Image (tube, grey):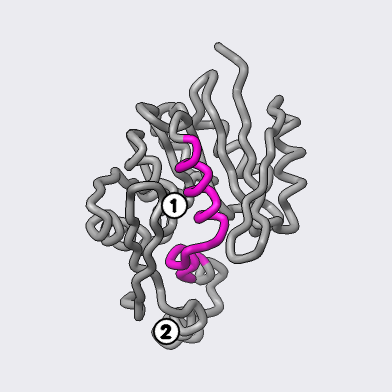
Amino acid sequence: MKYPTQIKQRKLGNKLYVMEVIRDLDEAIDLICDSMTPDEQLDPFAEDLCPYFGILWPAAEALAQYLNERPELVNKKKVLELGCGLGFPSMVATHLGAQVLATDFHPDAQEYLQRNCRHSSLSIAYQRLNWREDSEDLGKFDVVMGSDILYESKHPREVARGLIKFLKPGGTILLTDPGRNYLQYFIDAMKQEGYQEEMTTLSIEGKENFIFKFINEYTE
C-alpha cells in the first residue's frame, strides 16, 4: 500500500535523522478500508494491517533521546528492537555504534525503515517477526528494546516474555511507554519473571513518557 508521506527531521547530538512518515493516520486507514472487500474488513486480522508503524510516536522519540544521552548502553553492543516501526531508536543505536537487528510484523515496515536509513545515511539489518508468536531463534542480544507496544490487554505478559526471550544473561531491557492502561500489568509481569525496574520520564510534545530499564542479573 502506498501512503501519502511527509519528512520529519530530528537532530540528536551531531547527527541529523531524516524520517519519511505517513502524513495522516486516519487518511491511511481510509485508504486501506477502501482497498478491502466487505469480507476482508470483517477479518479480525485486518487490524494488523493498520499502518500504526508509520507514525513517529512520542515513545519512540523518548527512547531515541534516552539512548542518545546514554551511548554506553548500546555502543559495541548487539541490540534487538521489537516492533520497530519507522526505526528511530534503531537508527540512533546504530549511529552510536551498536549492531542492530530491527524487527516488526507489519508487511510495510521494512520499506519505511530502509527509506529512513537511506535518508539518514545508515544501514540496519531487518527481519519481519511476530515476536509474540514466532518461536524462531534470533539468538541472544545485549540489549532488547521496544517503544509503545503495550496497547492490548493480552500484551503485558507477552511483551515481558518476548523481551526476556531474546536477552543475554546480564543484558539490558529498555521499554518506553506513554502511560497506557496496561503499563502496570507489564511491570507486574516483569517482576514475576524476577526483574526490577529503574524508571525515568521524558517529556515529548508536552507529555510525559515513561522509560524503564530492566537488568538481568543472572549469569546462567
Q: Main secondary structure of the magenta part?
A: helix
**Badge 2 local density, few (<14 within 10 Å), some, or many (20+)?**
some
Q: Residue furthest top?
A: 220
Image quadrant containing the C terminus: top right
**Whole-percent x, y for residue 216 in the image:** 60, 23
Q: Which residues are magenta?
A: 48-70
Rounded to the nearest angstrom, the CA distance separating label 1 from label 2 is 23 Å
Label 2 belongs to which residue?
31
In the drawing, does residue 59 fall left or right of residue 154?
A: left
Label 1 belongs to which residue?
84
In the drawing, does residue 32 fall left or right of residue 17?
A: right
SS state under label 2: helix
Residue 116 in sight here:
yes
Label 2 amino acid?
Leu
Q: Nearer the viewer, residue 25 or 132?
A: 25
**Whole-percent x, y for residue 84 in the image:** 44, 52
**Whole-percent x, y for residue 38 in the image:** 50, 86
**Whole-percent x, y for residue 132 in the image:** 54, 46
In the drawing, does residue 213 fall left or right of residue 181?
A: left
